[in-house]
Amino acid sequence: MSTLCWVRRDLRLHDHAALSHALKEGEATLVFVFDKLILEKLKDKHDRRLSFIIDSLKEMEEMIRHFGSSIVIRYGDPVEEIPRLATELRVKNVYCNRDYEPYAKDRDTKVGKRLLAQGIGFDQFKDSVFFEKHEVLTNQGGVYKVFTPYKNKWIETFETSGKVIPDFTCDLGRLRKFKNSHSILDHDWYADLGFVETPSLLGGGTTNAKKRLADFAPRMSDYAEARNFPAIPGTSLLSVYIRHGNVSVRDLVRAGTARRSEGAKTWLSEIIWRDFYHMILDMYPHVTKGAFKREYDKVIFPGGAQEFKSWEEGQTGFPIVDAAMRCLNQTGMMHNRLRMVVASFLCKTLLVDWKHGEHYFAEKLLDFDLAANNGGWQWSASTGCDAQPYFRIFNPYSQSEKFDPKGEFIRQWVPELAHLNAREIHKPDPLMAPDYVRPVVSYELNRKRCLDLYSILKTTEG
């Protein structure tokens, strides 16, 4: 039987649920669709994410050429392209892995209906998360809205299963053999898509992903502490590879459970956080439009365009914030600790609506993932499930002193302050750093304003 395997955010050829099932059914063809509806919304035609995706596809193409096959590439609306291609190839079934974002769920529903009308099957599989929404529930069968009990139940479910981690083997020798003149290697897709090739600091593909994972393995024991310091290699740098599926979530769980250390436990906890946020997005899609806790939509943020501009350009006068934002703008990357710092700063110090920051990260982050990005911003703004209390406001000065104590990260991205010592650099004296912008607001004053701003919720709750 001939099948079609539609790859999206799962750009790899190993441990791939949909591909494994497709190959077991018969001769399979891989297809990737550059989604016109998504690409047309990208303002920056030098978007590094597209180059990362193309790099990943090129690696896959090189691998399957050894088996005489190729990836079919299309550009357009997948709702039109997938049914059309399925008909052209006369396949019996189309396979893909589930995506939990609202747009993707709607898209896949439409594709499934069209395929059904054509007499073609459409099967989706769990692949991008370890446990889906209905696999980790409360004892009463409800959905968890707080992370720690969810995490405990996740671990309990995993241990009850005997710690079984599935491995979806893929016999690439069963791929359909054909020559493809419009392959990702032989055709200028950048020109067709209207984008410019813009390589990122992290090259795409499974080979690079596995190297990162192997490099991180001996450092995992230090992860619990080291992950908080942006000037040292304390994180795995795997987030972009996870986002595009160059490694599987099962690869991550295997790595996290292979070691017994606090660092490994923390690493596994981060994987569980990812499952948690994807579950929340799947079950409560309203989070893409506003607060998870709907009462927080009543908060009116007074910060305006000028405050937001200073934040996005890294010109706030708060060194750790400016360093983080300049790093993001130049590389598409930001350390996780700094994501929390700049998010808290935008909505609780500059008093700008968190949704503006969420949107900006969506445009800039190389590893942008809707579930994680939305969950992180709502955590920082205190509007989400299991979020930090509204009265917890990150102090950018103390965060800087604690997590960049020598000012190494600041010096790298804010050269105006490079001459200052470790004590001076966190809160520079204008006379000692005349070329650096003055603070756009008073942290102390705006902290009080923020508490007053959120006090409407106490009144409402009372």
Image: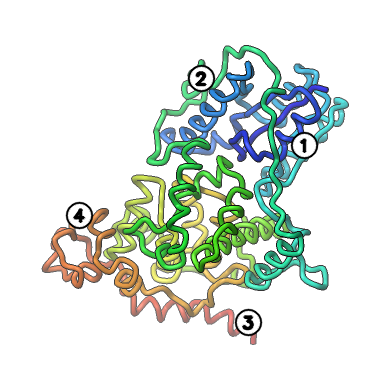
Which comes sooner in the sequence, label 3 or label 2?
2
Which comes sooner in the sequence, label 3 or label 1?
1
- Residue that carries the numbered disc 4 in the rendered image: 415
Name the kind of residue labelled 2 in the image: Leu
Is residue 344 in view from this perspective? yes
Which comes sooner in the sequence, label 3 or label 4?
4
Give how far across and how far down residue 352 sits, in percent: 44, 64
Tell me the mark number nearer the camera, choosing from 4 and 2.
2
Above/below status of 260 relative to 114: below
CA–CA distance between discs 3 and 2? Answer: 59 Å
**Residue 460, numbered circle:** 3
Give how far across and how far down residue 128 sits, in percent: 65, 47
Question: Given contact means CB atoms under 8 Å apart, are the residues at marks 3 and 4 in contact?
Answer: no
Which comes sooner in the sequence, label 4 or label 2?
2
Tell me the mark number nearer the camera, choosing from 3 and 1.
1
Q: Residues within 10 Å of mark 3 (few under 14, many from 20)?
A: few
**Residue situated in front as seen by the camera: 70 or 45:** 70
